[in-house]
Image (cartoon, grey):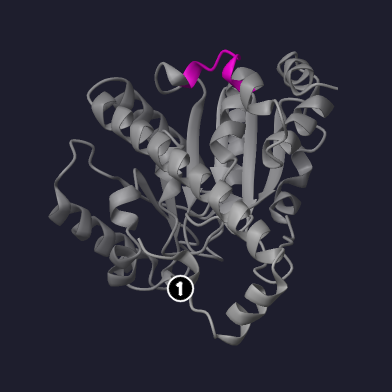
Amino acid sequence: MLAEDVVARAIAGERRWLARAITLIEQRAGGVTAALSQVKVRRRRGPGAPHVVGVTGPPGAGKSTFVDGLVTFARTEGRRVAVIAVDPSSPFSGGAILGDRIRMEHHAADDGVFIRSLSSRGHLGGLSGATSEIVDLLDACGFDLVLVETVGVGQSELAVIEVADTAVVVLTPESGDTVQTMKAGLLEIADVFVVNKDDRPGAPALVRALESMIELDGVSSWRVPVCSACARDRRGVDEVAAVAARHLAWCLGEGRDNWQRRRGDGRVRRALDRVAEVARAAAWAKLGSDSAALEAVRTGEVGPDALVGPS
Protein backbone atom coordinates (compact mmCIF):
# COMPACT_ATOMS: atom_id res chain seq x y z
CA MET A 1 0.00 0.00 0.00
CA LEU A 2 1.24 3.49 -0.84
CA ALA A 3 2.35 5.73 2.02
CA GLU A 4 -0.29 8.32 1.11
CA ASP A 5 -3.03 5.69 1.49
CA VAL A 6 -1.70 4.63 4.90
CA VAL A 7 -1.58 8.26 6.07
CA ALA A 8 -5.08 8.91 4.73
CA ARG A 9 -6.52 5.92 6.61
CA ALA A 10 -4.73 7.03 9.78
CA ILE A 11 -6.24 10.50 9.53
CA ALA A 12 -9.65 8.90 8.92
CA GLY A 13 -9.42 7.47 12.42
CA GLU A 14 -8.25 3.90 11.87
CA ARG A 15 -6.01 3.22 14.86
CA ARG A 16 -4.11 0.33 13.28
CA TRP A 17 -3.21 2.44 10.27
CA LEU A 18 -2.06 5.28 12.52
CA ALA A 19 0.44 2.88 14.09
CA ARG A 20 1.59 1.77 10.62
CA ALA A 21 1.95 5.38 9.44
CA ILE A 22 4.16 6.17 12.43
CA THR A 23 6.33 3.15 11.59
CA LEU A 24 6.71 4.43 8.02
CA ILE A 25 7.77 7.84 9.36
CA GLU A 26 10.34 6.22 11.65
CA GLN A 27 11.71 4.17 8.77
CA ARG A 28 11.86 7.18 6.42
CA ALA A 29 9.86 5.08 3.97
CA GLY A 30 9.53 6.30 0.41
CA GLY A 31 6.60 8.65 -0.17
CA VAL A 32 5.77 9.31 3.48
CA THR A 33 7.34 12.79 3.55
CA ALA A 34 5.38 13.80 0.47
CA ALA A 35 2.20 12.36 1.97
CA LEU A 36 2.66 14.35 5.18
CA SER A 37 3.28 17.55 3.26
CA GLN A 38 -0.23 17.29 1.82
CA VAL A 39 -2.13 16.86 5.09
CA LYS A 40 -3.76 19.69 7.02
CA VAL A 41 -1.63 20.40 10.10
CA ARG A 42 -3.20 22.94 12.45
CA ARG A 43 -0.04 23.68 14.43
CA ARG A 44 1.63 25.17 11.36
CA ARG A 45 -0.66 28.19 11.81
CA GLY A 46 -0.22 28.67 15.54
CA PRO A 47 -0.07 27.01 18.98
CA GLY A 48 -2.73 25.08 20.76
CA ALA A 49 -4.47 22.87 18.23
CA PRO A 50 -3.41 20.44 19.53
CA HIS A 51 -1.66 21.64 22.67
CA VAL A 52 1.73 19.90 22.51
CA VAL A 53 3.27 19.47 25.96
CA GLY A 54 6.83 18.20 26.32
CA VAL A 55 7.76 16.47 29.56
CA THR A 56 11.48 16.26 30.26
CA GLY A 57 13.86 15.83 33.18
CA PRO A 58 16.49 13.43 34.50
CA PRO A 59 16.00 9.65 34.69
CA GLY A 60 13.94 8.51 37.65
CA ALA A 61 12.15 11.84 38.10
CA GLY A 62 8.77 10.17 37.55
CA LYS A 63 8.09 11.53 34.05
CA SER A 64 6.08 8.52 32.86
CA THR A 65 3.93 8.47 36.00
CA PHE A 66 3.40 12.20 35.67
CA VAL A 67 2.41 11.88 31.99
CA ASP A 68 -0.04 9.17 32.99
CA GLY A 69 -1.61 11.60 35.48
CA LEU A 70 -1.91 14.30 32.79
CA VAL A 71 -3.64 11.79 30.49
CA THR A 72 -6.13 10.89 33.21
CA PHE A 73 -6.88 14.56 33.90
CA ALA A 74 -7.33 15.38 30.20
CA ARG A 75 -9.72 12.47 29.72
CA THR A 76 -11.93 13.74 32.55
CA GLU A 77 -12.32 16.86 30.41
CA GLY A 78 -13.22 14.77 27.37
CA ARG A 79 -10.10 15.59 25.39
CA ARG A 80 -8.51 13.10 23.00
CA VAL A 81 -4.90 12.47 24.00
CA ALA A 82 -1.85 11.10 22.21
CA VAL A 83 1.39 10.22 23.99
CA ILE A 84 4.81 9.87 22.40
CA ALA A 85 7.27 8.27 24.82
CA VAL A 86 10.88 8.27 23.61
CA ASP A 87 13.23 5.64 25.02
CA PRO A 88 17.03 5.65 24.65
CA SER A 89 18.52 3.24 22.14
CA SER A 90 21.52 1.11 22.95
CA PRO A 91 24.75 2.37 21.33
CA PHE A 92 25.78 -1.29 20.99
CA SER A 93 22.72 -3.19 19.76
CA GLY A 94 20.66 -0.21 18.60
CA GLY A 95 17.65 -1.66 20.44
CA ALA A 96 15.39 -0.02 23.01
CA ILE A 97 13.17 -1.41 25.75
CA LEU A 98 10.21 0.87 24.91
CA GLY A 99 8.89 0.29 28.41
CA ASP A 100 7.30 3.63 29.30
CA ARG A 101 3.89 2.39 28.15
CA ILE A 102 3.84 -0.08 31.05
CA ARG A 103 3.05 2.77 33.45
CA MET A 104 0.10 3.82 31.27
CA GLU A 105 -1.35 0.42 30.47
CA HIS A 106 -4.71 1.14 32.17
CA HIS A 107 -5.46 3.54 29.28
CA ALA A 108 -5.03 0.75 26.72
CA ALA A 109 -8.79 0.13 26.33
CA ASP A 110 -9.62 3.85 26.02
CA ASP A 111 -10.32 4.82 22.40
CA GLY A 112 -9.65 8.45 23.32
CA VAL A 113 -6.00 7.71 24.13
CA PHE A 114 -3.20 6.70 21.76
CA ILE A 115 0.22 5.81 23.18
CA ARG A 116 3.30 5.11 21.10
CA SER A 117 6.85 4.43 22.24
CA LEU A 118 9.72 5.47 20.00
CA SER A 119 13.42 4.67 20.07
CA SER A 120 15.73 7.66 20.04
CA ARG A 121 17.82 5.72 17.44
CA GLY A 122 20.95 7.43 18.72
CA HIS A 123 19.49 10.88 18.13
CA LEU A 124 20.72 13.53 20.57
CA GLY A 125 18.41 16.05 22.21
CA GLY A 126 16.20 13.57 24.07
CA LEU A 127 13.85 12.88 21.14
CA SER A 128 13.66 10.64 18.12
CA GLY A 129 14.53 12.27 14.80
CA ALA A 130 10.99 11.49 13.61
CA THR A 131 9.18 13.08 16.57
CA SER A 132 8.19 16.33 14.88
CA GLU A 133 6.71 14.58 11.84
CA ILE A 134 4.79 12.18 14.10
CA VAL A 135 3.39 15.12 16.08
CA ASP A 136 2.24 16.63 12.76
CA LEU A 137 0.45 13.37 11.93
CA LEU A 138 -1.23 13.26 15.35
CA ASP A 139 -2.27 16.87 14.81
CA ALA A 140 -3.86 15.94 11.48
CA CYS A 141 -5.66 13.06 13.22
CA GLY A 142 -7.48 15.59 15.41
CA PHE A 143 -6.03 14.91 18.87
CA ASP A 144 -6.61 17.72 21.38
CA LEU A 145 -3.50 17.11 23.49
CA VAL A 146 -0.17 15.57 22.52
CA LEU A 147 2.24 14.67 25.33
CA VAL A 148 5.88 14.11 24.36
CA GLU A 149 8.03 12.41 27.00
CA THR A 150 11.77 12.68 26.37
CA VAL A 151 14.48 10.10 26.92
CA GLY A 152 15.66 11.45 30.27
CA VAL A 153 19.35 11.86 29.56
CA GLY A 154 19.80 15.02 31.58
CA GLN A 155 22.09 17.52 29.88
CA SER A 156 21.13 17.21 26.21
CA GLU A 157 17.34 17.36 26.17
CA LEU A 158 16.90 20.72 24.50
CA ALA A 159 15.14 19.55 21.33
CA VAL A 160 11.81 19.28 23.17
CA ILE A 161 11.28 23.05 23.14
CA GLU A 162 11.40 23.04 19.34
CA VAL A 163 8.49 20.56 19.18
CA ALA A 164 6.36 21.42 22.21
CA ASP A 165 4.25 24.49 22.90
CA THR A 166 4.85 24.02 26.61
CA ALA A 167 7.93 22.38 28.15
CA VAL A 168 7.39 20.85 31.59
CA VAL A 169 10.61 20.02 33.44
CA VAL A 170 10.15 17.37 36.14
CA LEU A 171 12.73 17.25 38.93
CA THR A 172 13.01 15.49 42.27
CA PRO A 173 15.00 16.27 45.43
CA GLU A 174 17.49 13.64 44.20
CA SER A 175 18.02 15.39 40.86
CA GLY A 176 21.00 17.39 42.14
CA ASP A 177 21.47 21.00 43.13
CA THR A 178 20.45 24.06 41.13
CA VAL A 179 23.93 24.32 39.61
CA GLN A 180 23.29 21.00 37.87
CA THR A 181 19.93 22.33 36.69
CA MET A 182 21.61 25.40 35.20
CA LYS A 183 24.36 23.26 33.59
CA ALA A 184 21.69 21.15 31.91
CA GLY A 185 20.12 24.27 30.38
CA LEU A 186 16.81 23.48 32.06
CA LEU A 187 16.28 27.07 33.17
CA GLU A 188 16.30 28.16 29.52
CA ILE A 189 13.90 25.48 28.27
CA ALA A 190 11.44 25.22 31.17
CA ASP A 191 8.01 26.80 30.84
CA VAL A 192 6.91 24.99 33.99
CA PHE A 193 9.02 23.39 36.72
CA VAL A 194 7.57 20.48 38.68
CA VAL A 195 9.20 19.22 41.85
CA ASN A 196 7.84 15.68 41.86
CA LYS A 197 7.90 13.28 44.83
CA ASP A 198 7.43 16.30 47.09
CA ASP A 199 6.87 14.03 50.10
CA ARG A 200 10.62 13.38 50.20
CA PRO A 201 13.13 15.37 52.24
CA GLY A 202 14.62 18.31 50.40
CA ALA A 203 11.60 19.04 48.19
CA PRO A 204 10.71 22.42 49.78
CA ALA A 205 14.35 23.50 49.57
CA LEU A 206 14.47 22.61 45.87
CA VAL A 207 11.29 24.62 45.25
CA ARG A 208 12.81 27.67 46.95
CA ALA A 209 16.08 27.29 45.06
CA LEU A 210 14.30 27.10 41.72
CA GLU A 211 12.19 30.13 42.52
CA SER A 212 15.31 32.11 43.44
CA MET A 213 17.00 31.03 40.22
CA ILE A 214 13.97 32.13 38.18
CA GLU A 215 13.89 35.47 39.99
CA LEU A 216 17.48 36.14 38.94
CA ASP A 217 16.75 35.25 35.31
CA GLY A 218 14.03 37.83 34.62
CA VAL A 219 14.31 37.69 30.80
CA SER A 220 10.92 36.50 29.55
CA SER A 221 7.54 38.06 30.28
CA TRP A 222 6.42 34.53 31.20
CA ARG A 223 7.47 33.93 34.80
CA VAL A 224 8.17 30.22 35.04
CA PRO A 225 6.06 28.74 37.86
CA VAL A 226 7.39 26.07 40.21
CA CYS A 227 4.80 23.45 41.17
CA SER A 228 5.00 20.73 43.80
CA ALA A 229 3.48 17.36 43.05
CA CYS A 230 3.46 13.68 43.83
CA ALA A 231 2.42 11.98 40.61
CA ARG A 232 2.25 8.56 42.27
CA ASP A 233 -0.56 9.84 44.52
CA ARG A 234 -2.12 11.98 41.74
CA ARG A 235 -1.46 15.07 43.85
CA GLY A 236 -0.61 18.33 42.11
CA VAL A 237 -1.09 17.00 38.57
CA ASP A 238 -4.29 19.01 38.02
CA GLU A 239 -2.49 22.19 39.09
CA VAL A 240 0.29 21.58 36.57
CA ALA A 241 -2.32 20.98 33.83
CA ALA A 242 -3.92 24.34 34.71
CA VAL A 243 -0.54 26.11 34.63
CA ALA A 244 0.23 24.54 31.23
CA ALA A 245 -3.11 25.86 29.96
CA ARG A 246 -2.16 29.37 31.16
CA HIS A 247 1.16 29.08 29.34
CA LEU A 248 -0.68 28.13 26.16
CA ALA A 249 -2.85 31.24 26.53
CA TRP A 250 0.37 33.28 26.85
CA CYS A 251 1.71 31.67 23.65
CA LEU A 252 -1.47 32.67 21.85
CA GLY A 253 -1.07 36.27 22.99
CA GLU A 254 1.93 38.06 24.42
CA GLY A 255 4.28 35.14 23.87
CA ARG A 256 3.43 34.54 20.21
CA ASP A 257 6.82 35.83 18.99
CA ASN A 258 8.59 33.46 21.38
CA TRP A 259 6.52 30.55 20.06
CA GLN A 260 7.28 31.50 16.45
CA ARG A 261 11.00 31.68 17.21
CA ARG A 262 10.96 28.18 18.71
CA ARG A 263 9.17 26.79 15.67
CA GLY A 264 11.67 28.45 13.35
CA ASP A 265 14.62 27.10 15.33
CA GLY A 266 13.02 23.67 15.22
CA ARG A 267 12.68 23.73 11.43
CA VAL A 268 16.34 24.70 11.05
CA ARG A 269 17.47 21.96 13.45
CA ARG A 270 15.37 19.32 11.69
CA ALA A 271 16.79 20.34 8.32
CA LEU A 272 20.36 20.09 9.61
CA ASP A 273 19.63 16.79 11.33
CA ARG A 274 18.27 15.36 8.10
CA VAL A 275 21.38 16.49 6.21
CA ALA A 276 23.54 14.82 8.88
CA GLU A 277 21.51 11.58 8.67
CA VAL A 278 21.91 11.37 4.90
CA ALA A 279 25.63 12.25 5.02
CA ARG A 280 26.30 9.69 7.77
CA ALA A 281 24.46 6.95 5.88
CA ALA A 282 26.38 7.73 2.68
CA ALA A 283 29.72 7.79 4.51
CA TRP A 284 29.00 4.49 6.26
CA ALA A 285 27.96 2.85 3.01
CA LYS A 286 31.22 3.93 1.39
CA LEU A 287 33.40 2.98 4.37
CA GLY A 288 31.63 -0.33 4.89
CA SER A 289 32.30 -1.36 1.31
CA ASP A 290 36.05 -0.83 1.70
CA SER A 291 37.34 -3.40 4.19
CA ALA A 292 40.90 -2.04 4.11
CA ALA A 293 39.78 1.50 4.92
CA LEU A 294 37.46 0.24 7.65
CA GLU A 295 40.25 -1.76 9.27
CA ALA A 296 42.59 1.26 9.07
CA VAL A 297 40.05 3.34 11.01
CA ARG A 298 39.56 0.58 13.58
CA THR A 299 43.28 0.25 14.24
CA GLY A 300 43.80 4.00 14.42
CA GLU A 301 46.01 4.11 11.35
CA VAL A 302 43.54 6.56 9.81
CA GLY A 303 42.05 9.23 12.07
CA PRO A 304 38.71 11.06 11.74
CA ASP A 305 40.25 14.18 10.19
CA ALA A 306 42.11 12.16 7.55
CA LEU A 307 38.91 10.27 6.77
CA VAL A 308 36.92 13.46 6.26
CA GLY A 309 39.62 15.24 4.28
CA PRO A 310 40.38 18.96 4.14
CA SER A 311 37.59 21.27 5.25
Residue at the spot 72% in from the left edge and 60% down from the top edge: 96
Q: Is residue 245 left or right of residue 218?
A: right
Q: Is residue 38 in the magenta section?
A: yes
Residue 14: x and y, percent?
81, 20
Left or right side of 193 for 285:
right
Residue 189: in magenta span: no
Q: For mark 1, does the 10 Å Cα neighbourhood hold few (<14), some (14 to 19), or many (20 or more) residues?
A: few
Q: Quadrant of the C terminus?
A: bottom left
Q: Is residue 306 left or right of residue 211?
A: right
Label 1 sits on what residue type?
A: Ala
Q: Nearer the viewer, residue 184 or 91?
A: 91
Q: Position of residue 195 (x, y in %)?
A: 41, 58
Q: Nearer the viewer, residue 155 or 50?
A: 155
Which SS class for mark 1? helix
Residue 166 visible in the picture = no
**Relative to the observer, which residue lies in front, 178 or 243?**
178
Residue 97 place in picture, x, y as percent: 74, 60
Look at the image and give the residue range highlighted in magenta: 36-43
230 sits left or right of 76 in the view = left
Q: Nearer the viewer, residue 67 or 296?
A: 296
> Which residue is drawn at the image coordinates 41% and 29% (left, top)?
245
Residue in view at x 59 percent, y 58 percent: 283
Residue 22 seen anywhere in this rendered image of the structure:
yes
**Rendered position, 269 above or below 45:** below
| Residue topped by disc 1 | 306
